[in-house]
Image: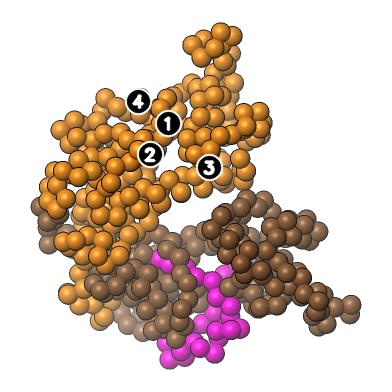
Chain colours: A orange, B brown
Amino acid sequence: MLNNYNTEDKVLLSVDCIIFGFDNEGLKILLIKRDFEPEKGKWSLMGGFLKKSESLNGAAIRVLNRYTGLQDIYMEQLYAYSEVDRDPVDRTISVAFYALINIENHNTALIQDHEAEWFSISKMPKLIFDHNEMVAHAIRRLRYRTSTKPVGFELLPEKFTMRQLLELYEAILDKELDKRNFISKINSLDILVKLNEKDMLSSRKGSYLYMFDKEKYDAKLLNHFVLNL
Amino acid sequence: MLNNYNTEDKVLLSVDCIIFGFDNEGLKILLIKRDFEPEKGKWSLMGGFLKKSESLNGAAIRVLNRYTGLQDIYMEQLYAYSEVDRDPVDRTISVAFYALINIENHNTALIQDHEAEWFSISKMPKLIFDHNEMVAHAIRRLRYRTSTKPVGFELLPEKFTMRQLLELYEAILDKELDKRNFISKINSLDILVKLNEKDMLSSRKGSYLYMFDKEKYDAKLLNHFVLNL
C-alpha cells in the first residue's frame, strides 16, 4: 500500500478512556488532572499514545491501568475523533473507549498520585481538547444501549434492590420512570433472580434483594432485545 | 503530548468504505478488484491512506469519490480495526465507514476502470485482510439500526410500493416478515406519505405508491424510536 503514502501524512494515534461509575449519588465519570503540557492542570480523560505492538483495545487497557491500577476492565470502542485541529500541538487522532465499573468495588484501587477523581455527569468540568464532546457521545451511547442491551451488572453491587436498579436507569436516561411500569418491563427481560433476602435499611418492611442471572444476562448482551422505557 | 511518544511507534492510518445498495435482487455491496500489491487482483473494499490535512470522514469521502465518482454520499463511521497483524506488510490501522446508496440512481456514475462491482451480500467473495470481518460487522450494524432508526430513504427509489419496503427490510434482516404486521408497525412510525398513484406493473389491481415524509424521517433519525419487527 506504500504507493499512495507520504511520510508527511503521518499522524499520531492515541486512545482516551471514558469510565462510568454509579453510586448512591448517581452516574459519575472518572477524570484526571493533566500533569504535562499543553493544558497542564486541566481536567482530562485518561489517554495515551498507541504503541506499534498493541491493538487500540490493548492500548486503552494499558492506559487505564497506568492511571488507576484497574485491571481486566472490559472497554468498548466508541468512536475515532479526527478533526484536523482537535489537538493544538500535534496532528493526533484519538479513538475513545468507554467502560462501566462499580465505584465501590474499585475505588480503593485508584492510584492517587495522578489525581483521578469521580465527577457527577451533571457537574462535569470543562475538559481539554474535544473530551467534553467524547463524554457527551459516550452518554448518548450508554442511553441508547439501555434500549437494546442489559445494563447494570458492572455498575451495581452484587445484590441490589429494585429501587437501586430503577435509580440507575433513571440516572442514565436522565428522566423519572414509572416504578410499576419499569418493574414489569425489567421482569419481562428475565435476567433477574429474586433472593429470599431483604435490604432492611431502605424501608421499615425491607426491600427484596435481586441479583443478575449472569448466564441469561450475557445471552442478552449477544442477542439484543428491544426495551422501550 | 510528545513526552511519551516514540517515532518507532508510528503506524499508518487508512479508511475503508462499505457501500450498501439495494435493487430487485436484494441487498448488495460494492467491491473493487485491487490493482496493486500486496494481494493484487483480489476483491477488496475501497480504501486509502489518511492525509494529514483531512478528517477520517473527509478521507472516506475522497476515497469513495476516487474509485466510483460518487459525491456527497453520507457515510457513518463503523469501527477502527487495529489488530497488530491485520495488514501483512505495514502496521496499519483502518477505520471503516459505511453508506447506503440507491443502485439505480448511482450506477452510471461508477468509474469502470477500477473494476468496481456489486455483489449480493449472500454471495460475497473472499476479501483481502480483515475486510470480510468489516463487512459482517457493517451488516450487523445495519440490522441493529433498523430497530432504532428509519432505513430506506437512501436505498429505495423516490416512489415505492409497500412490498418494496417490506423486501428491503427482509433483505437487511435476512428473514421473512409477516406483511400485515410489518405494515401496521411501519405505519405507526408515521414517516410515510401514501400517494394517490399506483404502480400497475406489480399486480393487476396495482399497488399504491409511497414516499418518505423527509421531514418526519429526518426527525426520527435524530430521535431514535424502538421498532421490534
Q: Which numbered disc flags the more N-terminal residue, 3 or 2?
A: 2
Nearest to the observer: residue A33 or residue A105: A33
Q: Earlier in the sequence, mark 2 or mark 4?
A: 4
User: How far across and down, in percent of the image, does residue B59 sit?
Assistant: 34, 74
Disc 1/disc 2 C-alpha distance (Å):
8 Å
Cα distance between the residues tagged 4 and 3: 22 Å
According to the picture, the residue beneath numbered tag 2 turns out to be A121
Give the residue number, with chain letter if any, for mark 1.
A26
Q: Which mark is residue A105?
A: 4
Q: Splitting the image into 4 quarters, where does residue B69 fall? A: bottom left
Q: Determine whether B107 is above or below B128 in the image.
A: below
Question: Please, which chain is the residue tagged with disc 4 on?
Answer: A
Residue extent of the magenta highlight: B96-122
* Camera-side mark, 1 or 4: 1
N-terminal-most mark, 4 or 3 = 4
Q: Is residue A22 above or below residue B167?
A: above
Residue in the picture at 56% in, 41% down:
A220
Residues under numbered marks 2 and 4 in contact, where contact means CB atoms less than 8 Å apart: no
Marks 1 and 2, the one that precedes in the sequence: 1
Q: Which residue is mark 3?
A: A146
Task: Identify the image quadrant of the N terminus of chain A.
Answer: bottom left
